[in-house]
């Protein structure tokens, strides 16, 4: 049975781990760590909600080492999420839901995981957190950026301290940042690909910066200092769609190729993820499809989970082409992640007038 483990000291061996695959030997269950600092109002950080995204673990490990010899500037609560999946280095186990889709406010059916996340939120909310930070990685090429769920100055200020690039989203539901936004300024950090030293350092430095803040500014954040994009749709691959990426041995892309290409419905470029955070215009070719007569091989869902595929895509001369200007984010070449989550998100620039 899934149970929340709560501890108030750093367990032996945690700071010495070289990776997350052995974390289960120290923390066998999802764990909430409570540590006291000079300021009692805690900072809440969640890590390993996706267990193949270890940057958050290494960033927290680095911070805990830094403050071994002297008090932290602020109390800290750290939630270690999908520990069982971290054992084998996958986003989630086949029998598990996504740990970042089962937080309060989502529409996932009640389960051990939804009850666990409700318990975490109840405990953290009672402590009146200063801010909430959820640390993630991408599987494709993306800049570092922060995601928020409320267009309020404290949220924008929190995001601007991590990156000039900010993404505002209202879907998917059931994510940590959306649940915690009801109680404090909350952000999701996207720190590039796993195990990149720069991503670990950036996340650790950011958390340390928030540690030292007395308060978050409520003043207007200038559009010269921040660029905000809003996700408007999500591109998913239907189970019936066979897809692949073109081989590109010269570029050395990390692409999993199908042995039999004859039955694929759509093929994308080998370095398809280079399009992340690029302005794409109507007519841009998204991929090569097998025949004009086939239905559009991707599905586009808006924030209300309504099918808006034909609003964004059409097929012309065996090519999947864009119908309107968008900016994609989180394009990945990892087929398993695409099946479990999505191919990418589609965004539009957002003016902030607060």
Image (tube, helix red, strand yellow):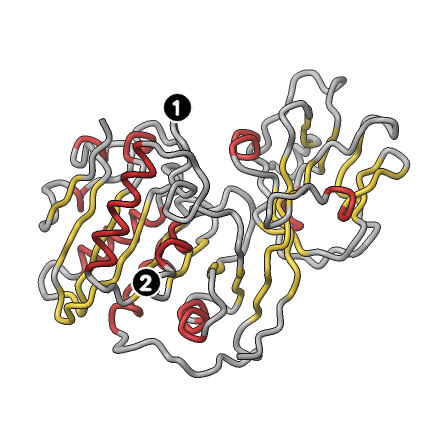
**351, above or below 103, in the image:** below
Of the two numbered discs 2 and 1 in the rendering, the one whose residue sits closer to the viewer: 2
Instruction: Mark 2 or mark 1: name the one nearer the start of the chain.
Output: 1
Residue placed under numbered mark 1 in the picture? 95
Q: What residue is drawn where x is 34% and y is 27%?
A: 88
Residue found at the far right of this picture: 317
Q: Quadrant of residue 99?
A: top left
What element does badge 2 sit on?
loop
Residue 152 lies left or right of residue 22; in this view the side is: right
Tell me the distance, in whole angstroms, between the alpha carbons under discs 2 and 1: 31 Å
Disc 2 residue crowd, few under 14, some 14–19, many 20+, Cα 10 Å: some
List the residue tagged with mark 2: 183
Crowding at label 1, few (<14), some or many (≥20) Cα neighbours within 10 Å?
A: few
Residue, x 53% and y 73% (percent of image)? 226
Q: Residue furthest bottom?
A: 219
Query: Can you give x and y, in whole percent of width and height, for residue 39 in the image?
Result: 16, 71
Secondary structure state at the residue bearing disc 1: loop
Point out residue 164 in the picture as x, y percentages from the top left corner.
51, 69
In the rendered view, does 6 fall on the left or right side of 171? left
* Percent position of residue 276, x then y: 62, 52
Quadrant position of residue 188: bottom left
In the picture, which quadrant includes the N terminus?
top left
Q: Are marks 2 and 1 in contact (CB under 8 Å)?
A: no
């Amino acid at each position: 049975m899934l149970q929340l483990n709560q501890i108030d000291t750093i367990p032996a061996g945690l700071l010495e781990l070289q990776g997350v695959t052995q974390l289960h030997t120290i923390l066998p269950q999802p764990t909430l760590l409570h540590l006291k600092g000079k300021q009692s109002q805690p900072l809440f950080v969640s890590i390993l909600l996706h267990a193949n995204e270890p940057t958050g673990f290494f960033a927290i490990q680095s911070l805990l080492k830094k403050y071994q010899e002297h008090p932290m500037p602020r109390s800290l609560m750290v939630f270690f999420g999908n520990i069982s999946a971290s054992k084998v280095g996958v986003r989630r186990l086949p029998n598990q839901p996504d740990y970042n889709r089962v937080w309060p406010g989502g529409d996932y059916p009640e389960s051990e995981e939804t009850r666990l996340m409700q318990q975490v939120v109840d405990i953290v909310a009672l402590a009146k957190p200063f801010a909430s930070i959820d640390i993630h990685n991408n599987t494709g090429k993306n800049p570092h950026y922060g995601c928020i769920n409320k267009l309020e100055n404290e949220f924008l200020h929190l995001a601007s301290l991590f990156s000039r690039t900010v993404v505002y989203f209202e879907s998917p539901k059931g994510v940590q940042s959306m649940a915690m936004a009801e109680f404090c300024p909350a952000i999701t950090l996207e720190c590039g690909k796993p195990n990149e030293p720069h991503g670990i350092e950036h996340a650790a430095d950011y958390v340390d910066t928030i540690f030292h803040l007395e308060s978050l500014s409520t003043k207007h954040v200038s559009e010269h200092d921040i660029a905000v994009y809003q996700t408007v749709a999500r591109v998913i691959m239907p189970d019936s769609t066979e897809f692949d990426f073109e081989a590109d041995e010269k570029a050395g892309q990390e692409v999993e190729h199908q042995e039999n290409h004859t039955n694929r419905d759509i093929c994308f470029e080998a370095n398809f993820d280079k399009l992340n955070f690029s302005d794409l215009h109507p007519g841009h070719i998204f991929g090569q499809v097998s025949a004009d007569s086939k239905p559009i091989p991707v599905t586009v869902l808006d924030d209300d989970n309504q099918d808006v595929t034909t609003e964004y895509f059409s097929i012309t001369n065996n090519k999947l082409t864009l119908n309107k200007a968008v900016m994609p984010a989180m394009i990945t070449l990892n087929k398993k992640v695409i099946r479990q989550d999505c191919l990418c998100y589609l965004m539009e620039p957002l003016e902030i007038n607060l």
